[in-house]
Each structure stands twice: as C-alpha cells, then as structure tokens.
Image (tube, grey):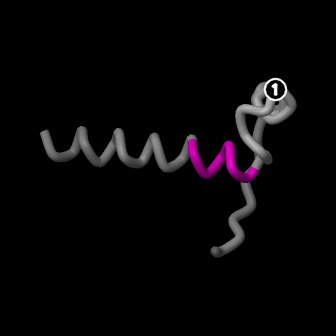
Amino acid sequence: MKVVTVKLPEFLLKKLDELVEAGIFPSRSEAIRTALRNQIEKELANLEK
C-alpha cells in the first residue's frame, strides 16, 4: 500500500476517533480506507448512469 497524507478538520478527526474507540473500525487508517472506497464506488456508479 502507498502512504497518502491528508489534513482533516478537528471535528472530523474526533468523529473518526469515536468510531475507532467504539470498535467499529480497528484504526483510523481502516476507517478512512473504508470511507474512501465507499465514496469512490458511489461516484463511479453515478458516472455509469
């Protein structure tokens, strides 16, 4: 995997940490990967319409 650096607003980082602390995701990285993958799939599906 490649490393990508992103800057997030504080409120979004706090929400991300809440998901990790709740055990929904094992790490920030996994939460971001999942969110990005879901968004990319959604946008690609919209392009195909």
The residue at 79%/33% (across/down) is: 23
Q: Position of residue 29 (x, y in %)?
A: 73, 52
Q: Quadrant of the C terminus?
A: top left
Q: Would residue 39 be found to the left or right of residue 8 on screen? A: left
Decide whether residue 45 is among the magenta residues.
Answer: no
Q: Is residue 20 left or right of residue 49?
A: right
Q: Which residues are magenta?
A: 29-34
Residue at image position (79%, 47%) is 27
In which quadrant will I find the N terminus?
Answer: bottom right
Picture coordinates of residue 46, whole percent (x, y): 24, 38
- Element carrying mark 1: loop
The image quarter containing residue 22 is: top right
Q: Please, what is the three-letter code of the amino acid marked with disc 1?
A: Ala
Residue 31 in the image: above or below residue 17: below
Asked if residue 32 is among those painted magenta in the image, a careful observer would answer yes
When the figure is inspected, residue 4 is found, relative to residue 34, above or below; the finding is: below
Name the spot of residue 4 as percent of width and height, x first. Answer: 69, 65
Q: 27 left or right of 47?
A: right
Give whichever of 20, 43 is nearer the camera: 20
The residue most toward the front is: 23
**Disc 1 crowd, CA 10 A, few/some/many (<14, 14-19, 20+):** few
> In this view of the protein, which residue sits in the foreground, 7 or 40?
40
Main SS class of the magenta portion in the image:
helix
Residue wearing tag 1: 22
**12 versus 4 height, above or below:** above
Q: Which residue does the image show at 66% across and 46% down from the upper left?
A: 32
**Foreground pick, 36 / 26:** 26
